[in-house]
Image (tube, rainbow, N blue to C red):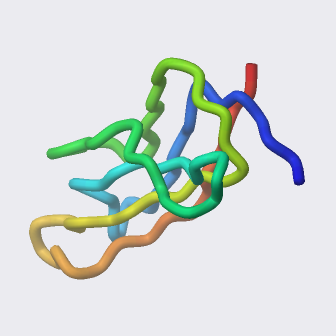
Amino acid sequence: MHYREITRVVVHTSAGAPLRDFDIQVLNQSEKWWDTVRTVDYATTTTFTVTFPPRVARGVRVVAKVGPSDQPDQVRVAEIQAFAR
């Protein structure tokens, strides 16, 4: 199993269906649950950088809660980048 100490995540969405509200989560070392390291509300860009104190994890996920105002139930995540220390 490969674990890394993650400190930053960059999320890229599309102009047609950007994320507005979302959570960034990392897979806990026990791999039994996901920890929310950052909640973002009312994002206005298609690229969003999230920094947080170092977390040892094996995975990263984005939990989309709300999309754009004209299609709140639709979002697209084009790329997720996780950066280790």
Work out whether residue 80 or residue 34 is closer to the camera in this orientation and state it: 34
From the image, which quarter does the C terminus lie in?
top right
Residue 28 horizontal side relative to residue 69, left or right = right
As drawn, 15 above or below 57: below
Percent of width and height locating residue 80 = 61, 52
How many discs mark residues in the rendered view?
0
As drawn, 14 above or below 40: below
Q: Residue at x 33, y 65 (%)?
A: 64
Percent of width and height locating residue 66 = 20, 66
Residue 50 horizontal side relative to residue 19, left or right = right
Percent of width and height locating residue 53 = 50, 18
Q: Which residue is drawn at 50% across and 64% down?
A: 77
Percent of width and height locating residue 21 = 22, 54
Work out whether residue 78 or residue 26 is closer to the camera in this orientation and state it: 26
Q: Which residue is drawn at 27% across and 42% down?
A: 39
As drawn, 59 above or below 72: above
Q: Which image quadrant is residue 8 in?
A: top right
Q: Which residue lies furthest to the left in this view?
A: 69
Q: Residue at x 58, y 53 (%)?
A: 27
